[in-house]
């Protein structure tokens, strides 16, 4: 996606893309980070509409899941409430990935652990997510029709210990919904994704924002599906695109038997 400031316009595109995915046979759809809004200053307002039990965006996603008969891994959505029900002190929010099953039920919640505070050297220059977001602190896996799924978001990709922890909890595939900058994406996106797939012997599904969002923000795109051997099965370019791929859970066992790195670990 190339999400903008207007949530209603972004969700209209989400609806159309989910419909296309379902019509083409997808059983699980994964949205990128910030799919509903790419406007940092509006995150708190958006987050305060989402309660402990529901909210307009989550209700929209649940309706889409039920109507289309599809699971949805909802990239990231701002939340002003922590998993335990306590409030996030204003003006910050949590960046939350929700997993919704094909009956519209919320079956998992992951709050982004690693926050992007960095000097990139692009038109934006400096990024400090910790001004807008409060970090989560819990690894999350959930069983899906494609196997046990480990959840992560964007900057988490640079921290291999997170994925090692997800695999230790049984994950056979992981998602990396992202909004990687054009500069860092060009340099590191594919390399990091393939490294996580190879070293943890899991499928990696990485939908990325990709395009010019405003005068300063450009994201890299190049969404990918990578198999446990590190092979890029499908990849996109910059710009909005529906990317379809088949995830074969049996491939995980094949790779782990051929290269028994988990059995050979000594640390």
Image: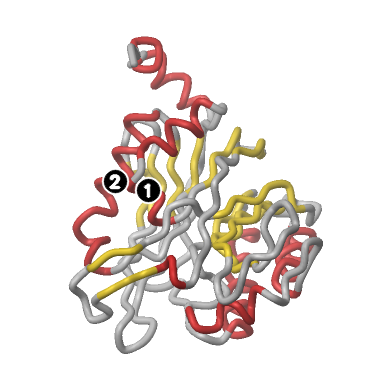
Task: Classify 10 Å Cα crowding around label 2: few (below 14), some (14-19), many (20 and above).
Answer: some
Question: In the figure, 18 relative to 72: above or below?
Answer: below
Residue 24 shows up from this direction? no
Q: Earlier in the sequence, mark 2 or mark 1?
A: 1
Q: Nearer the viewer, mark 2 or mark 1?
A: 1
Distance between the Cα atoms at labels 2 and 1? 7 Å
Question: Residue 179: where, in percent of width, then height?
Answer: 40, 65
- Name the residue: 39% across, 29% down: 200
- Name the residue: 51% across, 25% down: 168
Left or right: residue 118 versus residue 207 is left
Residue marked by disc 1: 157
Residue marked by disc 2: 192
Q: Quadrant of the C terminus?
A: top left
Question: Residue 226: where, in percent of width, then height?
Answer: 38, 42
Circles 2 and 1 in contact, beta carbons < 8 Å: yes
Question: In the figure, 44 relative to 105: above or below?
Answer: below
Question: Residue 57: where, in percent of width, then height?
Answer: 70, 72
Name the residue at the front extreme: 89
Question: Residue 135: where, in percent of width, then height?
Answer: 51, 56
């Amino acid at each position: 996606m190339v999400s903008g400031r207007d949530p209603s316009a972004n969700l209209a595109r989400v609806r159309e893309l989910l419909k296309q995915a379902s019509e083409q046979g997808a059983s699980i759809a994964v949205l990128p980070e910030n799919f509903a809004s790419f406007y940092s200053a509006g995150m708190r307002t958006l987050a305060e509409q989402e309660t402990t039990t529901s909210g307009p965006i989550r209700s929209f996603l649940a309706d889409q899941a039920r109507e289309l008969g599809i699971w949805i891994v909802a990239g990231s959505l701002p939340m002003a409430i922590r998993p335990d029900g306590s409030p996030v002190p204003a003006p910050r929010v949590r960046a939350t990935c929700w997993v919704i099953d094909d009956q519209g039920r919320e079956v998992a919640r992951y709050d982004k652990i690693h926050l992007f505070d960095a000097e990139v050297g692009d038109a934006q220059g400096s990024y400090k997510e910790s001004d807008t977001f409060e970090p989560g602190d819990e690894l999350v896996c959930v069983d899906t029709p494609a196997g046990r799924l480990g959840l992560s978001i964007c900057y988490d990709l640079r921290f291999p210990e997170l994925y090692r922890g997800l695999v230790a909890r049984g994950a056979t595939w992981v998602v990396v919904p992202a909004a990687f900058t054009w500069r860092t994406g060009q340099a590191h996106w594919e390399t990091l994704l393939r490294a996580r797939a190879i070293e943890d012997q899991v499928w990696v599904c990485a939908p990325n924002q990709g395009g010019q969002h405003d005068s300063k923000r450009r994201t890299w795109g190049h969404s990918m599906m990578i198999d446990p051997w590190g092979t890029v099965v499908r990849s996109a370019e910059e710009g909005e695109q529906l990317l379809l791929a088949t995830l074969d859970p049996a491939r995980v066992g094949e790779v782990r038997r051929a290269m028994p790195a988990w059995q050979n670990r000594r640390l």
